Image (cartoon, helix red, strand yellow):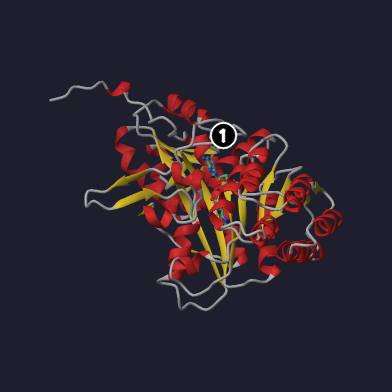
Amino acid sequence: MVQTKMSKFRTVRGMRDFLPKHAGKMRYVERVSRELALLYGYKEVITPVVESYKLLAAKSGEEIRQRMYAFKDLGGRKVALRPEFTASTARLVATRMKNEPKPMRLFCLGSLYRYDEPQYGRFREFWQANYELLGSEKPEADAEILILTNDLIERLGLRNYLFKIGHMGILRGILSQEGIVEESQNRIMQLLDKKQEEEALRVAKDRNVSERCIKTLKTVLETRGKEPSRVLRRVKEEVQEYEGAVAAVENLSDILELAKDSGVKFKMLIEAGFARGLEYYTGLIFEPYVPQLEIALSGGGRYDKLIELFGGEPTPAVGVAQGIDRLVLAMRKQRFSPRIRGEKRVVVIPINDELKAKAIELSLTLRKAKIPAEVEVMGRTVTRALEDADRKKATHTILVGPDELREDKVVLRDMKKREQKLVEIKNLCKEIM
Ligand code: HAM
């Protein structure tokens, strides 16, 4: 038999344990994300962590493709741990949910896996709250996804955030008209996503694009600004000879105008040459940032061809994945910690061994009234048990003693006020609430 000392076990590189405080923050962001899904009409679906490699690799982009936890299962199938939710949602819509009326609003929440180099804000296991709006090609669908993301960030109390916004149709419109095949376009987008602009332009040159194209690409890559209408007017002039790119600029204008006219305000940085690593995007793309973190909090955009690619009906779609880990990091950086007010925590302490069962019985009564209750299970003296209740920040303790019990009463101690009184058991819950 192999003898191992348990203390030698650590988490695998890139994997994390979440201790109660951190876990609580993650769950808080999840809870707010879930409430938001409900408020906007997104229905939750639960998809598997393990999917076919082919499905996940189809349009995820080179970067993610190379970082997938891919392996053969015992049946010899090539599978991978999901690096994102969009492929799984698209699979569902192309198959089992094919006949559902449109639009469909779907929500997923859970862990994802990417073999990234572990660093600040980049983990091998991380969590997303993912929202997909399927079936509409209209700008109001794109605007909804932007507005929903803004709503979440606001509800989490974050400040001074900014949305980086672009449109895949601008660059793709130029490159397509120049006869660049999709594969080369993807290569260029990957390089731009990694901020390797010179290299991206070199790939375009190698594909024999016109001088005019290189000139246009260079100016597009430099065009950015915080005032949408001004930036987009400039981009439109720059790309006027490329029909697809002009249509993209007009579409982005429509989306942002809708968001603005609906009264929603958020800071934006429009970048005409913005690209995201995932290959399925066809329209709007965006990422919100806070000044204290260099990495995006979330990422989203429009992908009109994916469901068709997976064998479904042509279904335009737009969505966003909110990075739960990074939202928690941003909250910590901005020192925002939600006050969960009015929460009671009660410790029930039997003052001798004969009263253990009664203490358990009382704790059950409290929990039935939705009051969180713990029972003293260490057999400690009342003084010690009270000290421990203080350490855990219990709001109340209940001392169960034989004399009081004879009159159907217990001692209820308010731990903050350091006051105690005799309370009839039938009034206990009312007294605590
Ligand atoms: P993504 O930009 O790859 O997009 O990821 C979205 C968010 O997930 C990121 O902004 C970040 O907060 C979080 N994230 C990604 N990788 C890591 C990591 N290694 N560690 C920590 N957090 C990470 C997508 O996943 C698309 N499926 C979004 C989408 C949905 N587009 C349309 N619908």
Front-most of residues 73 and 419: 73
Secondary structure state at the residue bearing disc 1? loop
Can residue 341 be seen by looking at this rendering?
Answer: no
Q: Residue furthest right?
A: 230
* Label 1 crowd bin: few (<14), some (14–19), many (20+), radius 10 Å: some
Residue at coordinates 33% horizontally, 38% vertically from top-left?
355
Q: Quadrant of the rendered structure where residue 238 is?
A: bottom right
Measured from the top left, where is residue 113 in percent x and y?
44, 44
Disc 1 residue type (three-letter): Met
Q: Give the vertical position of 326 relative to 40 (above or below).
A: above
Say which quadrant the N terminus sits in.
Answer: top left
Front-most of residues 196 and 356: 196
Measured from the top left, where is residue 120 in percent x and y?
57, 31
Q: Dot 1 corresponds to which residue?
A: 415
Measured from the top left, where is residue 304 in percent x and y?
58, 66
Front-most of residues 34 and 261: 261
Q: Residue furthest left?
A: 1
Residue at coordinates 85% horizontally, 52% vertically from top-left?
227
Q: Quadrant of the rendered structure where residue 297 is?
A: top right
Front-most of residues 283 and 429: 283
Q: Is residue 228 left or right of residue 11?
A: right
Residue at coordinates 67% horizontally, 52% vertically from top-left?
209
